[in-house]
Image: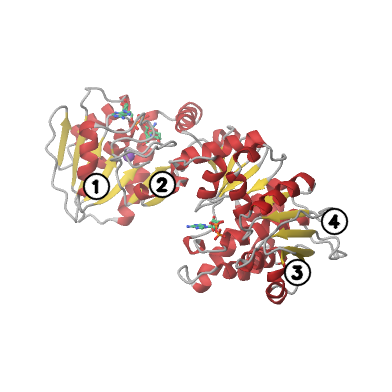
Amino acid sequence: MKILTGAQIRELDKYTIEHEPIASIDLMERSARAICNAICEQWTQSTPIVVFAGPGNNGGDALAMSRMLAEKGYVVDVFLFNIHNHLSEECAKNRDRIIGEGLVRKFTEITANFEPPQLTEKTLVVDGLFGSGLKEPLTGGFASLVKYINQSPSQVVSIDIPSGLMTESNRPQEEPAVVKANVTLTLHIKKLAMFFADCQQYLGEVRTLDIRLSKYFIDTFPSLYDTIETSYIKSLMLKRDDFAHKGSMGNALLIAGSRGMAGAAILASKACMRSGAGKVTALTPHCNLNIMQMAVPEAICLVDRENYYSEAIDTDCYQAVGIGPGLGKEESTALALMSQLQQTNCPIVLDADALNMLGAHGSWVQQLPNNMIMTPHPREFDRLAGRRITSDYDRLTFARDMARDLCAYIILKGHYSALCLPDGGVVFNTTGNSGMATAGSGDVLTGIITALLARGYSRKNACLMGMYLHGMAGDIAAKRVGKESLIASDIIDSLPEAFKNLEK
Ligand SMILES: NC(=O)C1=CN([C@@H]2O[C@H](COP(=O)(O)OP(=O)(O)OC[C@H]3O[C@@H](n4cnc5c(N)ncnc54)[C@H](O)[C@@H]3O)[C@@H](O)[C@H]2O)[C@@H](O)CC1
Ligand SMILES: Nc1ncnc2c1ncn2[C@@H]1O[C@H](COP(=O)(O)OP(=O)(O)O)[C@@H](O)[C@H]1O
Ligand SMILES: [K+]
């Protein structure tokens, strides 16, 4: 599903209104009906409802929904904030309707002073103050109202997006004036901010309500942001030739591990073997040789004479190279890494310490050959970027720019890992769960993507499929062992099931 910016969503609304065609007041009626139904599914008529409506169409939605809830027998008190004496056309129409019908218990239009109502544990607050039209952080009376809502013991439902949260960029504020919702009922399309870790505290459970906005517009309008679709991943699956042999299924090399970090190399190699590569070779320090051979007997081992990776090797016989898990940060490792990157011609995945070493030698990042695949978690990305980035939106923007400048494929890892492409596009992954927040799960991803590259997937497809399979294997593992007990090896053990799901 595409993710549209606030400005694009406005165009989508406009297009739907013109081409369905439907009057904007009727589209608001449709949105309000969907919101009303979602509330009725979760809260009974005995729940007292307090609605805070703003001056724009988010407020209009809230007013129309209040009327519908009242028609269904809910007790609804409505506060409409009209402090600048200006309401959007549809908001004003809905105010008139609400007053005309007289079904809500109390309707108050605030033009100056506001006496806040009592909000109890039983109350359901509906937040319809601001939606996708918010231009800057809330201040003054609105900030105080948000604070009042957040300090109350009431449950909160936000319409479209919690008021105070911007649809895209949200920089950290000292005292953020953003409603903390229990449930966000977002209209038709998830907003970009909903994919960021630093916005989650405001969103609660996000439910997307279908309000039948133009499918044609969504399908044809170019968008920078997209999410992975299962059907698309399935369509990418390469067939396995009946006459395949290990030499034709890809030879993958992993450069991983150092003294005390054999585990990273083991996890990456095992994941690589389980992801379809014909042959996997691990280059690892001699001190890890025995454990590697015992733990992953299927992999071939090459040894570095030091206790860490110290020398680049010839990679002509490999179809993909993964470098970084557990590599350590010795200076000679960093030098070997750079020399390796210069002399390797096949696709390369850079992860973990490989990224940390690049970050530590800032100017090296700009010298990277084109087409690198990088899989940083947020802190690794900040090191790569050479500065501490304070918001997830800024980090994504930085990663997008870097992917374009370096012609690289950057997977910014997280709950919704984001693949930033050389053409400036971003694709969010939708599989995976918090059980995967456990050491070594990133090493598994490196192994998977390296295998897919060796198998012959393009860089873009290997990244998309790798993220998706990794998360799906994590989801299968979580069902089996639970999120608390999940460890990285469980993700590897679930890879066969994940692949089988894609073959269905
Ligand atoms: N046509 C329709 O009926 C539809 C309505 N929708 C609803 O409309 C909303 C968007 O409506 P609008 O574009 O009117 O925008 P909003 O209702 O989000 O807010 C616009 C109002 O807020 C004011 N404002 C902006 N930033 C402010 C700030 N920092 N402090 C104080 N006031 C501020 C603006 O001047 C304007 O009066 C969506 O979120 C959704 O709820 C659409 O989603 C679906 C279609
Ligand atoms: N809460 C979460 N939801 C979904 N995926 C997660 C979550 N936490 C971690 N992951 C995934 O697990 C992996 C963790 O990678 P990383 O931090 O590099 O681990 P390590 O360095 O220990 O191997 C990433 O692919 C990330 O997307
Ligand atoms: K809202």
Using the image, tell me which numbered label, if any, was put on residue 198: 2
Badge 1 density bin: few <14, some 14–19, many ≥20, Cα 10 Å:
some
Question: Image quadrant of residue 103?
Answer: top left
Where disc 4 sits, the SS reads loop
Percent of width and height locating residue 126: 27, 45
Q: Check mark 2 vs ligand 2: CB closer than 8 Å? yes or no.
A: no
Give how far apart the Cα atoms at labels 3 and 4 are.
15 Å
**In the rendered structure, which disc, 2 or 1, sits on the residue that comes first in sequence?**
1
Where disc 1 sits, the SS reads helix
Give how far apart the Cα atoms at labels 1 and 3 are.
55 Å
Q: Is residue 177 above or below residue 284?
A: above
Residue extending furthest right?
Answer: 243
Badge 2 density bin: few <14, some 14–19, many ≥20, Cα 10 Å:
some
Return the residue at label 3.
299
| Viewport quadrant of the C terminus | bottom right
Give how far apart the Cα atoms at labels 2 and 1 are.
17 Å
Residue type highlighted by circle 3: Ala
Q: Nearer the viewer, mark 2 or mark 3?
A: 3
Whether label 4 touches label 1, CB < 8 Å = no
**In the rendered structure, which disc, 4 or 1, sits on the residue that comes first in sequence?**
1
